[in-house]
Image (cartoon, helix red, strand yellow):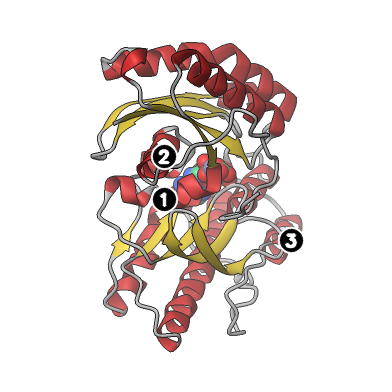
């Protein structure tokens, strides 16, 4: 089985071909970083236009790199939400047109479900598993019982964790996207310089709040008499340490909750762009070790947005005999597991 996946929900135009036996035959990503850099964030209209310009080239390349012809495909899957609606419409319409012309099934993929299932593409992870989904748009902890059966046990009450990395980077004019830059700067800083808050870490709750942490960083920066690279590195390291502590505290609380409810997850999985952060991966891995749990995370290049995870979600749906209508309406909002 060969599935073409198409991703266009934010600032990556991507196409990939994946097989049912978990081989990634091609994985092409055009990143729009240069288009958005000057704005320190993604501009939806600019993103939609760039997707439109690049989508056919990226898809052709994915087919060529896989060494297959279009007729070999068994289905076409595309992100149909949640995301910036202009870009989602570009990818979804392109994929529908391909499916229609090839007379192959079309699969409407929920972008966050694709992040959530991505670990099953690269490792042997069985249901149920405990998931931390930490990306630019989301931060939630859930139990994954099946490909479209999720129980959310904790979520952010305000910003997502990736957004807080991006905002902290923006405050120091470090560039976009902020996560990888803050992670890199942290390595030269002292994480004990600033004692940033760890919101909601005293309560036995799995919910997150990042806006107070972000404000604390802003206030600390305002109080500094001067700011050079060394100071920025200390801010990054202290912020990064706070995020590591928050995420690992919450995952430990979630593991305790599973135990009290007699749920035995097969693994603890982290996914989404923030899961590319090595220190966060290491810290959560250490928690897993303490509890004798299997730890799993997609390889770093599959944590951030890509189409291999979309194609894989398509494979999982196709194996369950699922199909979607060509009338499927792209959705700017679409919660995990939400039916329509
Ligand atoms: O999953 P993703 O590519 O897009 C969404 O679905 O949102 O996540 C992008 C987010 C951005 O906020 C980016 O700053 C963050 O993931 N990110 C990181 C790292 N790499 C990307 N955050 C922390 N450390 C990283 N190494
Ligand atoms: Zn994403």
Q: Is residue 138 left or right of residue 255?
A: right
Image disc number at residue 89: none
Residue situated in front as seen by the camera: 224 or 211: 211
Disc 1/disc 2 C-alpha distance (Å)? 8 Å
Q: Which residue is mark 2?
A: 309
Crowding around mark 3 (Cα neighbors within 10 Å: few <14, some 14 to 19, many 20+) is some
**Residue at 69% of width from left, 59% of height from top?**
214
Q: Is residue 68 left or right of residue 191?
A: left
User: If you read the primary sequence from the N terminus, does the residue marked by circle 1 or circle 2 appear first?
Assistant: 1
User: If you read the primary sequence from the N terminus, does the residue marked by circle 3 or circle 2 appear first?
Assistant: 3
Question: In the rendered image, is residue 187 in sight?
Answer: no
Identify the element where label 3 is drawn. Answer: helix
- Relative to 94, residue 118 above or below: below
Disc 1/disc 3 C-alpha distance (Å)? 33 Å
Identify the element where label 2 is drawn. Answer: helix
Q: Are marks 3 and 2 in contact (CB under 8 Å)?
A: no
Image disc number at residue 215: 3
- Relative to 154, residue 303 above or below: above
The percent coordinates of residue 328 (x first, y second) are 63, 34
**Residue at 56% of width from left, 23% of height from top?**
96
The percent coordinates of residue 250 (x first, y second) are 51, 73
Q: Are marks 1 and 2 in contact (CB under 8 Å)?
A: yes
Q: Which residue is mark 1?
A: 117
The percent coordinates of residue 261 (x first, y second) are 45, 85
Residue situated in front as seen by the camera: 228 or 20: 20
User: If you read the primary sequence from the N terminus, does the residue marked by circle 1 or circle 3 appear first?
Assistant: 1
């Amino acid at each position: 089985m060969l599935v073409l996946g198409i991703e266009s929900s934010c600032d990556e135009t991507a196409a990939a071909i994946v097989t049912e036996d978990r081989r990634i035959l091609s994985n092409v990503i055009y990143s729009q970083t240069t288009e958005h850099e000057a704005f320190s964030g993604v501009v939806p209209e600019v993103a939609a236009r760039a997707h439109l310009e690049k989508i056919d080239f990226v898809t052709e390349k994915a087919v060529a790199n896989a060494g297959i012809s279009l007729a070999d495909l068994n289905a076409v899957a595309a992100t149909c939400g949640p995301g910036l609606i202009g870009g989602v419409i570009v990818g979804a319409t392109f994929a529908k047109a391909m499916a229609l012309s090839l007379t192959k099934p079309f699969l409407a993929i929920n972008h966050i479900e694709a992040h959530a299932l991505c670990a099953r593409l690269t490792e042997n992870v069985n249901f149920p598993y405990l998931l931390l989904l930490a990306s630019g748009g989301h931060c939630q902890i859930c139990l994954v019982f099946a490909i479209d059966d999720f129980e959310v046990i904790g979520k952010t009450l305000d910003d997502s964790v990736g957004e807080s990395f991006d905002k902290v980077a923006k405050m120091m004019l470090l560039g976009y996207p902020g996560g990888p830059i803050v992670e890199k700067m942290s390595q030269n800083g002292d994480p004990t310089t600033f004692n940033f808050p760890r919101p909601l870490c005293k309560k036995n709750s799995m919910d997150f709040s990042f806006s107070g942490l972000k404000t604390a960083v802003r206030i600390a920066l305002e109080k500094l008499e001067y700011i050079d690279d060394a100071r920025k590195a200390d801010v990054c390291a202290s912020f990064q340490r706070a995020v590591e502590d928050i995420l690992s505290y919450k995952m430990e609380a979630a593991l305790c909750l599973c135990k009290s409810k007699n749920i035995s997850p097969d693994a603890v999985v982290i996914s989404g762009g923030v899961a590319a952060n090595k220190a966060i991966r290491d810290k959560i891995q250490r928690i897993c070790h303490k509890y004798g749990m299997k730890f799993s995370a997609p390889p770093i290049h599959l944590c951030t947005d890509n189409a291999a995870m979309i194609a894989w979600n398509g494979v999982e749906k196709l194996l369950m005999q699922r199909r979607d209508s060509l009338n499927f309406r792209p959705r700017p909002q679409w919660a995990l597991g939400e039916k329509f």
